[in-house]
Image: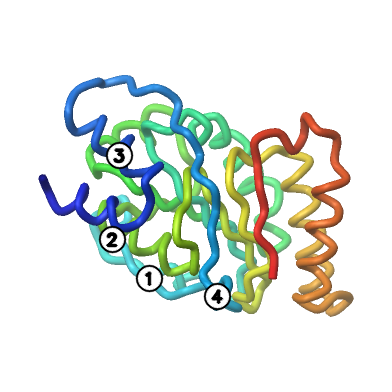
Amino acid sequence: MNKLVLGAIAMAAGVVGFFAYRLIASPEPAEPVVAELQRPTGGMPEVLPAFSLQNRDGQLQSIKDWPQKSMIVNFWATWCAPCRREIPLLNELQRTRSAEGFQVVGVAVDFREDVLKYANEIGIDYPILIGEQDGLNAVNSFGVEAVGFPFTAFTDSQGRIINLHIGELTAPQAKVILDTITRVNSGELTPATARTAVAQQLAALPERAAKDTGTIAN
């Protein structure tokens, strides 16, 4: 059994099953089952954890290379159907909200050749960092014991985490989170009050807008 699978076993059973399945046989696995997010006693970090992975050009790049940006860090994989479905929305967010200081970065926890082929085919308009075991380690740095994909972290312009979101992101959810982060950046809200506000507003969305998704807030 290779190092990728061994590392995945240590992280999350839900993710492991699909990596193992992909390694063994099928070129078109079933839609992944999203595992429940679990927090250790310490909870999620206050700020975006530092990690570095290879970018599209094969160069090591840090997630901290976008200073003073409000980050949308999306963990995904090519075999994950919900991940693929939300990419057009992430492209749209990069186009429409970058002028407000938002930056989307995709973190592909997958095989490099598969990621590059898929990204080129569909046209991903935002930066991508790629890693197998290193990608799983990056997920773990957010303080969660188990996670399914997609998994998205949102920060304010100072790198403080406002929201961790599991599952396919919808446009109404994105608007709630990004609009609230804008209020943090303007000084209207503190990160703590913003986390609470986001959780309350997401819970109040129509069921369809929040279907099969979850949020972690401090």
Tell me which amino acid carries mark 2.
Answer: Asp
Looking at the image, do the residues carrying marks 1 and 2 touch, with CB atoms under 8 Å apart?
A: yes
- Asked which secondary structure carries label 1, the reply is loop
Figure check: 65 above or below 178: below
Residue 63 shown left or right of residue 29 in the figure:
right
Residue 183 screen position, x and y as percent: 84, 68
Amino acid type for the residue under numbered disc 1: Phe
Marks 1 and 4 close (CB-CB < 8 Å): no
**Position in image of residue 21 (x %, y %):** 26, 30
At which x and y percent is residue 52? 34, 68
Residue to which mark 2 is pinned: 134
Residue that carries the numbered disc 1 in the rendered image: 51
Residue, far front: 41
29 is higher (above) or lower (below) than 68: above
Left or right: residue 208 compared with residue 133: right
Q: Residue flagged by tag 4: what amino acid is it?
A: Thr
- Label 1, label 3: how far apart the Cα atoms are: 20 Å
Amino acid type assigned to the residue bearing label 3 in the image = Leu
The disc label shown at residue 41, or none: 4
Q: Position of residue 94 (x, y in %)?
A: 61, 49
Q: Could you tell which of marks 3 and 4 lies nearer the N-terminus? A: 4
Q: SS class of the residue under badge 4?
A: loop
Asked which secondary structure carries label 3, the reply is helix
Q: Is residue 14 left or right of residue 196?
A: left
Outermost residue to the left: 1
Q: CA distance from mark 2 to mark 3?
A: 17 Å
The residue pinned by badge 3 equals 116
Q: CA distance from mark 3 to mark 4?
A: 37 Å
Q: Residues within 10 Å of mark 1 (few under 14, many from 20)?
A: some
Sequence-first disc among 4 and 2: 4
